[in-house]
Image (tube, grey):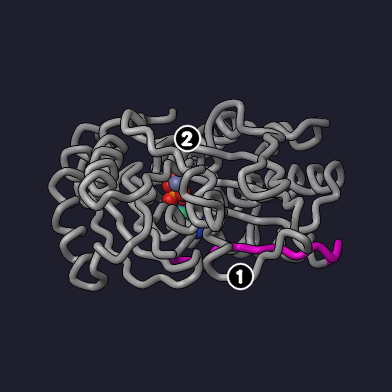
């Protein structure tokens, strides 16, 4: 079963063909990141126009690697994401499904993030489900229980900023990067020696008995500290990253204690963060609960995750269960 995945939720135009949810036969991506770096943040209109510019060239390149007439279904990110960008992917996927007479599978962006793990690892429902899921991206911070493919229970979310958004905004306040500065902030944190700011930034909601998150106050606290000018970039970056990771780890452990899940699956751009990976691995190893992180290249938005998610959620059930609705539209 070959699935062609299309992902256009933000600034990347990505297409892939994945066989049986495991083998990536081809992958092509173009990004408009440089344009957003120049404006110090994403301009949705520009992102959407670049999606239009890039879509046909990436599809042509994909087709030169794998004949797209050999695929069995088309999968596409339905949302959440930027409306203008999503529309380009959805309309392209609909056209491909119509022209090739194939089923069209809508995929939730956040679900695609943690299905990255299924591409790489042998995750067995009988052994690993129910699985606890933590999605941490630029737009979302969610804890979910995956009881079975397609059977999810929402446990908690951020009440304001997402973890990645807080990383990006703080990186900008620190003058590290105008756009998507999470990686740069993390690099600077790793250069910190003795930290005079250790544990001084807030760990919002950490000790509350719920599975919600809140990161906007942390970013504001970091802003005040930066304005005081008493601490180095490395010190602020170190305690900021530790604060985010402390909260993420603590809430995930709380969710694990409540659900007694058989494994932990991670997904989203922030799961590339080294400190988060190390801390969660240590905690879940100690509990004896298997933990799965996407490969670094699969942490962010990409089309292979979309195709893989479609495979596990719709196949090998008969294609009749697939939503072929030609009026399929965006999910926010
Ligand atoms: O999942 P993703 O690629 O896009 C969204 O769906 O939002 O996530 C992007 C987010 C950005 O906020 C980016 O700064 C953050 O992931 N990110 C990181 C790291 N790598 C990417 N944050 C912290 N540490 C990293 N190493
Ligand atoms: Zn994403």
- Residue 73's spot in the image, x, y percent? 37, 54
For image coordinates 46% across by 62% down, the residue present is 298
Q: Which mark is on residue 103? A: none
Residue 46 included in the magenta stretch of the image: no
Q: Residue at x 32, y 66 (%)?
A: 27
Q: Is residue 173 left or right of residue 93?
A: right
Magenta residues span 286-297
316 vs 54, nearest the viewer: 316
Quadrant of image for the N terminus: bottom left
Which label sits in the foreground, 2 or 1?
A: 1
* Quadrant assignment, res 8: top left
**Residue named by callout 2:** 227
For label 1, the residue is 121
Residue 170 can be seen, yes or no: no
Residue at x-position 20% and y-position 66%:
63
Residue 91 appears in the rendering = yes
Does the stretch in magenta take in 295? Answer: yes
Residue 245 is situated, as x and y percent measured from the top left of the image, at 65, 50
Q: Position of residue 137 (x, y in %)?
A: 50, 45
Work out how far the residue at label 2 is from the one at label 1, CA to CA, in angstroms: 45 Å
Q: Position of residue 123 (x, y in %)?
A: 66, 65
| Residue drawn where x is 80% and y is 57% of the image | 262
Quadrant containing the C terminus is top left
Of 145 and 199, nearer the camera is 145
Q: Earlier in the sequence, mark 2 or mark 1?
A: 1
The quadrant in which residue 219 appears is top right
Asked if 13 appears above or below 190 in the picture, the reply is: above
Q: Residues within 10 Å of mark 1 (few under 14, many from 20)?
A: few
In depth, the one of 323 and 15 nearer the eye is: 323
Whether residue 317 sits left or right of residue 5 in the image: it is: right
């Amino acid at each position: 079963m070959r699935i062609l995945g299309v992902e256009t939720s933000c600034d990347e135009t990505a297409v892939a063909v994945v066989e049986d949810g495991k083998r990536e036969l081809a992958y092509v991506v173009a990004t408009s990141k440089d344009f957003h770096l120049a404006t110090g943040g994403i301009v949705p209109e520009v992102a959407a126009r670049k999606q239009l510019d890039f879509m046909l060239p990436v599809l042509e390149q994909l087709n030169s690697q794998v004949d797209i007439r050999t695929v069995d279904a088309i999968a596409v990110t339905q949302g959440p994401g930027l409306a203008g960008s999503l529309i380009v992917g959805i309309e392209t996927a609909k056209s491909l499904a119509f022209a090739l007479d194939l089923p069209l599978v809508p995929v939730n962006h956040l679900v695609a993030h943690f299905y990255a793990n299924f591409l790489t690892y042998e995750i067995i429902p009988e052994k690993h489900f129910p699985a606890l899921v933590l999605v941490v991206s630029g737009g979302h911070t969610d804890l979910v229980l995956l009881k079975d493919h397609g059977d999810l229970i929402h446990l908690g979310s951020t009440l304001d900023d997402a973890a990645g958004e807080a990383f990006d905004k703080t990186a900008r306040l620190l003058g590290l990067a105008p756009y998507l500065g999470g990686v740069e902030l993390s690099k600077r944190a790793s250069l910190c020696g003795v930290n005079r700011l250790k544990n001084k930034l807030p760990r919002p909601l950490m000790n509350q008995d719920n599975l919600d998150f809140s990161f906007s106050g942390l970013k504001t606290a970091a802003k005040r500290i930066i304005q005081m000018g008493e601490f180095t970039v490395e010190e602020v970056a170190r305690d900021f990253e530790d604060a985010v990771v402390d909260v993420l780890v603590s809430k995930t452990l709380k969710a694990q204690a409540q659900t007694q899940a058989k494994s932990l699956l991670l997904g989203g751009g922030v799961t590339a963060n080294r400190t988060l990976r190390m801390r969660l691995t240590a905690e879940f190893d100690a509990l004896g609960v298997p933990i799965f992180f996407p490969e670094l290249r699969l942490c962010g938005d990409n089309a292979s995750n979309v195709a893989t998610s479609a495979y596990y959620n719709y196949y090998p059930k008969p294609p009749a269960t697939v939503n072929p609705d030609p009026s399929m539209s965006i999910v926010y």
